[in-house]
Image (spheres, rainbow, N blue to C red):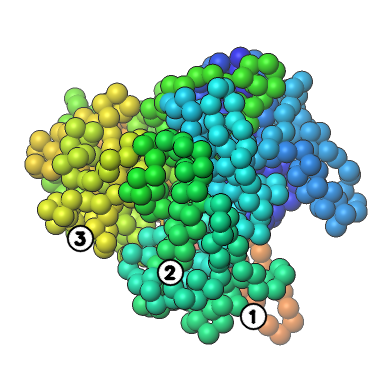
Amino acid sequence: MLTLGISGHFDLLPALHRAYMHDAAACLVADGELVAAVEEERFNRIKKTNRFPTGAIRACLDVVGARPSDVDAVGYYFNRDMVELGLRTFQLTAPATPVRTGADLIRDRLRADFDWAPDHLVFTEHHEAHAWSSFARSGMSDALVVVADGRGEHVSTTVYLAGGGGLRELRSYPVRKSLGLFYQDAIGHVGYGFGDEYKVMGLAPYGDPARYRDVFGSLFTLLPDGDYDLTASMPDMNPVAAAFLDFPARRTGSPVTQEHRDFAAGLQETLEVIALHVLTHWARATGAQRLCFTGGVAHNSSLNGLILRSGLFEEVFVHPSSHDAGAAEGAAIIAARDLGTPHTRVEPLRSASLGPSLGTDVERELLAWQGIVDVERPADVVAATAELLASGAVVGWARGRSEFGPRSLGNRSILADARPVENRDRINAMVKKREGFRPFAPAVPAEAAATYFDLTATSANHAFMSFVVHVHEDRRAELGAVTHVDGTARVQVVSRDANPDFHRLITAFGDLTGTPVLLNTSFNNNAEPIVQSVDDALTCFLTTDIDVLVVADFLVRRRTFAVDDLVPAFRPDTRLRRDWRPGEDVPAEIYLDHSHGPSAPLSPALFDLLNAVDGKSTLAELGEVTDEVRDGVLDLWQRRLITLRP
């Protein structure tokens, strides 16, 4: 049986708020096995996109060589009532819009994009979809399954007992007790917004939680039986804002002060205290020795590390796509059950490399950039890359099938020597253009992991960067680029079976340097999702200071090239705007037409040049290219507002 699970929305509004139906993805499950999974952001290049996952569906079908008509059922990651309520709310505010059901809209999209409308379409409970995605890949025969996120339909945390081929709900916590929304509401105080929770988690170790412990303590009450209350200020008001009215809230881009660091530390501690309270009760009440933890809160790897160290469970599993993209997989599993095929597989997930590969035309795609890059095919690209890394190079590495989830795990990665502490600042400056406090992760072969890291007595799959663990004290100086300020690291343990080439690369680097650990961070700059294609990898390479690019079996180095000879083009969502108001000099603007899409002002000369873009003519052919215009074009390319190609 082949079932398709999807997340995302129906593209009714191009600027639908990014927090609504986010993390669009597609997953294919064949006879219980997850055979393909990828997020739509990898194709439309919009982080955490909520648009309908057409590209992801097509990619999953291509991976397994299936036609749409081969799919027996489609599962959607929210229930029908939630979908219909959202649609009705929209229809009431837009009376000219035809009244359509969610099922109609999904079938319409599939019919338009694939000339196919499934006979069997299943809407699922959101938290049940999360729970199945985690338990099904845990390798556990029974477990406590805890889903914690912003919200499902009407709940924010749900506790299940899994076993015997099914899930039994033990308790759910209402949205007013949402740990995910509490954390999200709070991070605005330190200058962050939707999707930035992981940044605040990285800031927390620089602070002292004691400074604001009493204030945060006033915002929650721990109750018996694993219950708790979050103290609301006034209806529809941010509960954290009332308690921190006198706090000097940081604005985006302004300096981070010690007050902000201490706030982050207090917030992280609060999450951990409440989450451990819930988990402790249910571990004792059920006697469960194994835990599957999932939902967006389960991407808080610092919390996950604390769960390991707590000793509450003998084994813990965190799905590499615990956010809403992973719920698409659970929807596919539930769709199969709806057709009479309940999930029975218990094999653990070995690899998150579930997306599409780079394809069969890599060399042709690279040669299209001839004159801009030099392309070499060494006899052994893994050995050659190990030597480059050992000599100090920062390498963009794109090989094999892309990873499902927010972590680059050795197939779409930026790699460097994990030893020199200056590599952290160097990569932040050359590629990420991000805050210096954010840590990088180490990747280590399974055979050497215990030498460098305290993986605790609790069994866990450390392949997916899901847990922050302690670096052994006598190894922290050796791993200067990946050891966080508190002596921890979000480690990736690489097995030979799961990723043989990446394992061989780290091992070869260790043979050359004596330290078999690489710095591994996601292959993207700060304006885009992780790269997916050859073109994405080349674009990121050429708009950063990465030293060398590895694509499949090829080494790529940049040449000096003339920007004037490149062809500019617009993304599908790129828009130009120039307003006119009498007596005012109103600057023109370029922007991406989606919720919170970036924008940039344009000089008159740059606006005129871009207004002439036809996707065929080079910059030089479009008009006069001054230094100012040239610099402006390069900046827009780096910010992914336009594309440039030979």
**Looking at the image, is mark 3 or mark 1 earlier in the sequence?**
3
Q: In what quadrant of the picture does the N terminus appear?
A: top right
Depth check, front residue: 569 or 601: 601
What residue is disc 1 on?
585
Task: State how far apart marks 3 and 1 are (Cα).
Answer: 45 Å
Residue 355 shows in this picture: no
- Does residue 530 appear left or right of residue 99 in this picture? left
Give the image location of residue 417, x and y in percent. Answer: 19, 48
Amino acid carrying label 3: it is Glu
In the image, what residue occupies the spot 55% across and 22% down?
Answer: 164
* Label 3 neighbour load within 10 Å: few <14, some 14-19, many 20+: few
- Does residue 150 appear left or right of residue 253 in this picture? right
Verify CB contact (< 8 Å) between mark 3 and mark 1.
no
Depth check, front residue: 582 or 449: 449
What residue is disc 2 on?
266
Q: In what quadrant of the picture does the C terminus appear?
A: top left
* Label 2 neighbour load within 10 Å: few <14, some 14-19, many 20+: many
What residue is disc 3 on?
422
**Looking at the image, is mark 2 or mark 1 earlier in the sequence?**
2
Give the image location of residue 391, x and y in percent. Answer: 13, 46
Nearest to viewer (mark 3 / mark 1): 3
In the image, what residue occupies the spot 13% across and 38% down?
Answer: 510
Amino acid carrying label 2: it is Gly
Nearest to viewer (mark 2 / mark 3): 2
Task: State how far apart marks 2 and 3 are (Cα).
Answer: 29 Å
Q: Is residue 20 above or below residue 435?
A: above
Give the image location of residue 180, x and y in percent. Answer: 56, 56
Depth check, front residue: 519 or 290: 290
